[in-house]
Image (cartoon, rainbow, N blue to C red):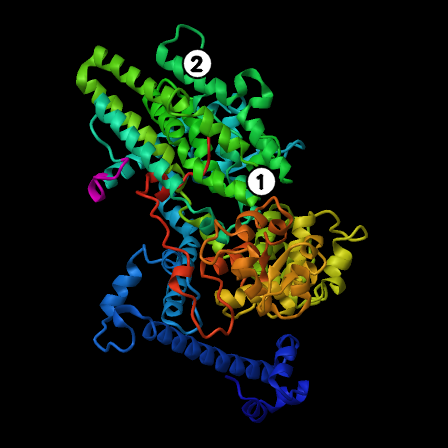
Amino acid sequence: MLDIENIKSEHAALVKRFNICCLLDLRQCWRDASRLDDDAIAASLAAIGKMYRDAMVKDLLDYLRECVVDHPFDGGPKNDKRTALAFRELLSDDRYTVSKLDTEHVEDVPLGSAVYGEYRMVELRESMMDGAYLQHASTNGDNGMVQQWKHLGFVVKRELPLANGRSVAVHVETERDKFDGRSYRDSFYYLLNIQEHQDFMPQAIRIADEVLAYAKSVIDTTAVENPLHPESFVPYNQATFRAKLEEIYEIHRSRAQNYDIYYAARNRNLADLVRGMMDNAPFNQCDGAWLRNISAAGPGDDVRALLFEIWSDEIGNGNPLLHHGNLYTSLLASHGVHMHALNTRAYADDPKIHESSYISPVFQLAISQHTNQFFPELLGMTLYLEWEVLSLARGIKLNDYLGLDTHFWQMHVGIDNATNGHGAKARDAVITYLDRIRNEGGNAAVDEHWARIWRGFVAFESVDSMGFGDDVAVSRRRPANPDERLAEVMTRKANYGALNHFQHRLGQHRINDLFDEPGLFQRMLASSKWIVPGDPEQSMFLKHLTTFEGPMYQIFDAADLAVWRSWIEWLGRDGDTPRVKRYFDKAQAMEALLIEMKSVAEGVGAHSRFKAQAPGGKRNTIAELFAADDIKCLMKALRAPDSGWVVPGNAEASPLVADMLRGTNGMGKALDRRFPTINNRIGRQIIIEWVRAGCPIPGEVQQVPKEQMAPPLKPLGPDLFMHTHGLGAVH
């Protein structure tokens, strides 16, 4: 890519100045060379940089061309009749995903095989789509200003009187609604402290109307695109209503029955589940919030009585130990997650929780402030939350296997049952209410109120897809680099940081001004005396500035300091990533995992008791097999029928997977982490995929027979709105 001899002849001054003999020397001196105020050196670096970029572009284009040409679509490369249109249609199919390939190909996938070509192209497409999404999302602020400019006020000059009798000129925005542009975090805080923010009440109506309008658009779109969707709108009569509910219930039951927890567990661990619990904390700690004003002083009726029973159960019927919000808080605490008090500003601003997590609870809290005005919609929301509780069954199975206490979710499946629990009460409340509406206003009134009820039903299912699109999913798939995480810290500290550095400078820039440009701030810091790239221990920023003796003591908490440390280490790798850039097939991944765990496994007491049948018929302890330094022999012993550890192709029947890898067992805990040297895969995932693939051994010529591989997964059944719009919380 770069020719050192060419560099020596074309850039002699640079080579002589830094005594460059090889490309490694060039890399190591690059940062120091870039700091010099020397036109000739700068010109050499620019020329070499251009050569490198040009070579990278060519290499990337060659790789992209290879991905397309080698893809096995339409008969593969041997078919010279293939068309770009056919390829485009395949890649445009949103069902053509890595998950789909996983369900179709449980076998080992060697490097360079046709299936490998499919995975490579699909993953490349998904990476490019995520990149395009992030690029588009980066313009949200600009687009939002253009779209919302009509709501902005006018900036006018005013004189502010001072205590000494003089005045100072200030510029103030006027003629703008006080709450316009407020975040969901702000709204969450105001609604939980509504007694102190009574002027927020009209904004609560606007929030409810906005969500319900979005729900109507989902209903209308579904009616056109998929009129047979199980949750599409249909005119009301009691028989049709009951039949629709039974259809939805059966779909959830079928999906739970056909759910394969071992397939689902292949790419999740306990840390992922706890992260998901934190995402759902604002929802579940506000459990039942949409019904909090369902009863007031004065006469009641049978419909409100049914809803009040549900609300009373949500808050523990007066027993704080049974309060659902308290139960969820205790569950979080049991996994080391301690949240601020729910109604505090600190909770609303918690950086550990993405803002999208506040959308649904804000909707609940907002609409509950106007219960009478939105009563039909509240009925529909209650029906959705309580009737579709069986959707939790799949998560309960997975959580239980991965070692998460499932009592909170099991309690909801029981209390919300469709026989005499909340599901039945919600159904009966809708029927009773519409019977009363018919008696008072006839069929036309029923149609109007039924449409509103179903809008509430769909609103609760679809509300989480408003506002933030796939922000959270993409950010989890593509975690930020250390420089991006540090930029977030800088932005968070900017309000005060930009006011407290006085005339201190980095180069020609005032530090106060650099907070406006985190990227430039980082570049200036990286070349300053405060940072030693790659060496946090010798960097004065951490060694002095942020210590007890320094001026920035306790400006950053432990998490922020960890970000600074990882950024400094990252600088020493010249922006490289810690993940090994190598492809592992399933056999190679299993071999690499056993090698990685070897030193630990030899000392595990249970491995001196448990045995497996090695090739040749001898039964050895697992510890002996690890100590023998023949990992392939260990793999063969594990899959041997007489060993009793693995049934090739059947994870459920394999004690190694079904028992030993459970999250509550020692082995399950040890392998419930990601291994950076094996493409960041979870240890449990590697073993499950190896078993499902029929336990292949690296280097074996004979392929695993198809009958020894896992059969195709059973289809889960039709998707409901919650599977396309997503809620992921309980009630």
Q: Is residue 156 visible?
A: no
Residue that extends furthest to the front in the rendered view of this protein: 617
Residue 350: image tag: 1
Q: Is residue 219 above or below residue 321?
A: below
The verdict on residue 228 being magenta is yes
- Mark 2 touches mark 1? (CB < 8 Å): no
Residue 398: image tag: none
Which residue matches tag 2? 295
Q: Position of residue 378 (x, y in %)?
A: 37, 24
Q: Nearer the viewer, residue 285 or 191?
A: 285
Disc 2 marks a residue whose amino acid type is: Ser
Q: Position of residue 158 (x, y in %)?
A: 51, 37
Q: Is residue 247 left or right of residue 623?
A: left
Structural crowding at the residue carrying mark 1, measured as other residues with C-alpha within 10 Å and reported as few (<14), some (14–19) or many (≥20): few
Instruction: Name the residue at 47% across, 58% down.
Output: 648
The verdict on residue 526 being magenta is no
Q: Is residue 226 left or right of residue 278?
A: left
Instruction: Name the residue at 65% across, 79% down.
Output: 29
Instruction: Name the residue at 48% across, 52% down.
Output: 651
Disc 1 marks a residue whose amino acid type is: Asp
Task: Indicate which disc, 2 or 1, sits on the residue closer to the N terminus.
Answer: 2
Instruction: Specify the quadrant of the image occupied by residue 215.
Output: top left
Q: Is residue 716 above or below residue 706?
A: above
Per the picture, the main secondary structure of the magenta-coloured stretch is loop
Residue interval drawn in magenta: 223-231
